[in-house]
Amino acid sequence: MVLYEFLLQKGLERRRVQERFFEIVFSAIEEGGIKIVQAPTGTGKTYGYLIPLIEKGQKAIISTGTKLLQEQLRRDIEVLRSYVHYITGRDVSYLIIKGMSNYLCLDRYYTERVEIPQIEEAINSGWDGDFEFVNLNAELKEKLCIDGDYCTSHYRNLCRYKRDCYYWGRLKRLEKSADILVINHALLSLKEFENTQERVLVIDEAHELDRYATSSLTVGISLYTLRVDILGKIREFLPSADVDLESFFIHNFETLFKQDKDQVPLESPLPYAQEFEKRIIMPVLSLYSRIKEEVTHSVLSFLKDRLFVSLNLKDYLLKSGMIAWEDYIELKSNYDEMSQEEENFLKKLKSYELLSRRILKLKEFFKLMKEENPQIGFMVSRNWSKKLGTYNYRIECFPVFPVNFTDFNSYKAVIITSATAHPVDLEKTLGIKGEYYELEHTLPYHKVNFLVYKVDPREENWKNCLVRAYKYLRTLYDKLLILLTNKEHRKLFENEDGLVFQGEDNLSKILEDLREGRIKALAGFDSLWFGVDVKGEKGLLMAKLPFESPEDPVTFHRLRFLKSVGEDPFEYQKRKALIKFKQGIGRLIRSKDDSGTIVLCDRRIFKFKEFHRAVEELGIKIKTLNCV
């Protein structure tokens, strides 16, 4: 391994556990199949799979949890490719790919006929079209992004910006030749990649794969979609059109949102289907029917007196369903490219086609509402919308378990890894089976103080105990992470000096403030248990064992489904909580130089032996304290 030996000479630490990871990756490249690797913090798992892939010149797709982690991978790949080029002269090409909605649509931008200075400057400076690198508000991004309903396959071939398109032009051309594609989990379930049989798929941060796969497969309809994307489009054709959309949501769902909860499960959408049809589906389809007649008439009028039309317009009209095959045959065409008049006419038709696709999605969602499918769960949520001037209500459905969400058999090999990769959970939730490897931990967990307050979270004095534990850790450390499980617990810490809550600012900035001592404590919920890296001596406060709330919509439907098929729902809850608990412990020790104290305010760790054993297996001694 030329690259590895060179890195060792440059100061890379030799780790036996990382070398074992190399062996697993090499065997996957040679043998194929699915390898599941639990690689604890300290393994060096990123280099563990990158070095063998690069050494072998193996084409790969690497999927990780978030766009932020994609950027971290970019830095690691840049380092390794520079060394490879220095040693061998060989170039390693890679490409960061995000979902199409992250990129500017040139056609939509220039159709708006409004120059936006930051976009103009970016376009003229060799920009890759990624919105992350320009400062635009969310509403403008949504208006200008590449949208699958707008950028249909038949329109894409006609688009004058086809070759320059940031996504379908430039990115797709680069994708074919790149050695390594770096994607995120949400994209993995939505995108088809070319020539996957030549590529090894690496799924990093696999403990989050279930969550992202479920989220990416979730579909729904919102008040915003109905009012802006559907009624807004209808008014382009019928300016006086109006539908009372909001009353359905308020009448049916407002009373469900209690105790500051803005997301609740629906046991079944059937009780709401009839009213949904009456108040929304029927009025919208009635207006759409009038528009369809008008557009059909305008198309026939446009074509009536023309001896010839372009082949491109002719094909578009057929593929978009605006003319029948018989009419297509009758049209005469002796040139390919559209005239200016035809292009102007096409722009008008695009609004209709976009509306038609939105209407189709609305009808498909309504069809799902009327079905009794135990493998599909429903939920309703709301969030305040400045644009709407009211709550944006949303009804959504999702697969209870996203089993077989992508075809792993199409890849040359698959490597699934995480510090808490759990083979049973991967099989139960995602249907993934593979050869399992559990690598040993190497970090000095024996230096961790682990204190358990002998209190049950259901007891009256638990909140007082949690605050006391916080104040105790603040006396010991200048850096403190607080891992909560319920947003109601935020109130206990709101007036604490030097404490910031996740979400108050960009997480990267908050973490930097904590590392540099500008703040003393960071508190957060689900995502703070995973992937946060703060080196050095610190305190870690776990409010309680992180069991998912049965009121969480996904958990609610999973527990109900498991019970219906005769399985123990609590085993699922324990397994998920254990993965999250281990991830939480991993926030304290990120390197050999880290140390500190963990305080858990939950004596149930001794009742559920899996959690107790997980701590002891790391070599951590547990001490108990009374909370009086």
Image (cartoon, rainbow, N blue to C red):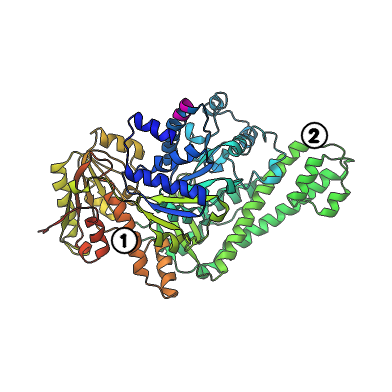
Q: Residues within 10 Å of mark 2 (few under 14, many from 20)?
A: few
Q: Is residue 536 left or right of residue 125?
A: left
The x and y percentages for residue 551 are: 37, 63
On residue 547, the disc is: 1
Q: Main secondary structure of the magenta part?
A: helix
Which residue sits at x=60%, y=65%?
Answer: 367
In front: 363, or 424?
A: 424
Q: Is residue 145 visible?
A: yes
Say which amino acid is labelled 2: Ser
Q: Is residue 168 part of the magenta span, yes or no?
A: no
Which residue sits at x=86%, y=50%?
Answer: 329
- From the image, which quarter does the C terminus lie in? bottom left
- From the image, which quarter does the N terminus lie in? top left
The x and y percentages for residue 559 are: 40, 68
In front: 183, or 351?
A: 183
User: Disc 1 vs disc 2: Cβ atoms closer than 8 Å?
Assistant: no
Which residue sits at x=16%, y=43%?
Answer: 474
Q: Residues within 10 Å of mark 1 (few under 14, many from 20)?
A: some
The x and y percentages for residue 554 are: 42, 61
Identify the residue under disc 2: 339
Say which amino acid is labelled 1: Phe
Q: Is residue 75 visible?
A: no
Q: Secondary structure at mark 1?
A: loop
User: Where does the magenta region start and end?
Assistant: 83-87
Quadrant of residue 256 in the image?
bottom left
In front: 531, or 250?
A: 531
In the displayed structure, 292 sits above or below 130; it is: below
